[in-house]
Amino acid sequence: MQNKEINQEKSVNEKNVEVFNRYFPGCLSIENDNKLTLNVGRLKALLGDFSEIKEEGYGLDFVGKKIALNQAFKKNNKILKPLNESTSKHILIKGDNLDALKILKQSYSEKIKMIYIDPPYNTKNENFIYDDDFSQSNEEVLKQLDYSKEKLDYIKNLFGSKCHSGWLSFMYPRLLLAKDLLKQDGVIFISIDDNECANLKILCDEIFGERNFCSLLSVVDNLKGNNNTDNIVNTHEYCLIYAKNKDLHIFKDMLVDENEDELMKWNIDEYGYWKEGRNIKGTGENAPREKRPSMFYPIYLSDDLEISLEKSNKYHIEVLPLTNGKEVCWNWGKDFLQANKHELIVKKVGDNYNFIKKQRPLLGDLPSKKMKTTCYKPKYSTSVSSATLKQLFGEPIFNYSKSIYFIYDLIQIATNEGDTILDFFAGSGTTAHAVLESNKSDYQKLSEGGGGYLMA
């Protein structure tokens, strides 16, 4: 399958802007009048000069933004020490995830195909426990970021607090580093709830680029509803999806569970599953015969609706591509039709005959379907994830862990064999579990070594 950018040649100017924004996202843009606009302040920040970063107000300009950027670009003096020598492609890192991301950048820059994270939700009931390291002296920070001592003390107190600015300052450096780890066709999934969903969307627009936003999923994880005092009972959370480069990433279809109603829509023949697709008769502006003369030809049918391109005593019913008496084209050429007659269903409608293409599943041996923005399966529920943990450890040692089956489906639509998956809020290890299950259930992945995971 060709990449999207191959289908439309870009100008040298557009290519240069694309390369520039690959390394300095959001700094350079082409306006409607084809004039270039450079965000000097953002470019300086990405090069280590934070003097022009604004922090007043609320939104993208949040209190603590300068020091959050400083945390992302500050040199890391820590090293990764293995507990034992191993050739496993799976790695579990114990330590601060900000340090871990900086260490991983040395070996995994632009090598991660998929990132899934379930960060702290900044709810009223919990403080997130990550206490970022401010090991630089106050004098260094004051000089580099142009802060007063009073403002520096105020901002340091925000980190790890429940306010929006504190949470954004916590997430900002981690997402900046995560973007650098993603391959050009990589994708990140971020689970979040109502408290910070809107802010996270704006933050990710800045980091990954608004045009690389893919979707916001509503994931039903508690159909009975959460116990709260609100009049409207909440049954879902969100999953925000961004690509590193949306033009390069292609989402695959999910496998359909055998017990799903979706399975009833499919038939099976000697070539596998199929369901009715489109009529191969042309429509639209390229449908008229004069547009594609070679695609206008007769198809011959037998009395039991078998197909032939040659007229005979058996194949005596002639069918031409006509719409309201006007000559149009088939979408299949003669040679292709001859080789793929088994992929057509013939239906008689009144005095006419329709040739319907069999739609085949795109993935595996079972029918598949696109992931929808509202995600609901009973096994996505938190009760199922608690039961899984209890089965493994004898008790549900984590509250509100994600379902392995939800992350499994994300892996199915976003990765291929040999891809590496990162989760830098490892928690209960659900992502690692899902990767192992995906490798085990997908024979092709298993036979080629399977995907690997990095957990921090």
Image (tube, rainbow, N blue to C red):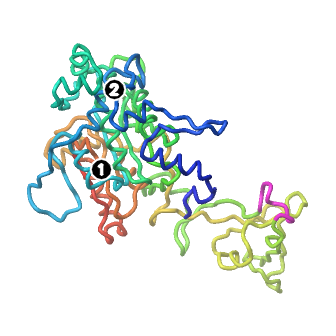
Residue 72, above or below 408? above
Q: Secondary structure at mark 2?
A: helix
Residue 381: image x %, image y %?
Answer: 34, 40
- Extent of the magenta region: 282-291
**Amino acid type, residue under disc 2 in the picture:** Lys
Quarter holding residue 77: top left
Residue 267: image x %, image y %?
Answer: 56, 64
Q: Front-most of 157 and 431?
A: 157
- How many numbered callouts? 2
Q: Front-most of 277 and 17?
A: 17
Residue at far right of view:
325
**Residue 422: which disc?**
1
Q: Is residue 288 left or right of residue 420?
A: right
Q: Front-most of 405 and 11?
A: 11
**Amino acid type, residue under disc 1 in the picture:** Leu
Residue at far bottom of view:
313
Classified by dominant secondary structure, the portion drawn in magenta counts as loop
Residue 50, above or below 323? above
Inter-mark Cα distance, 1 to 2: 25 Å
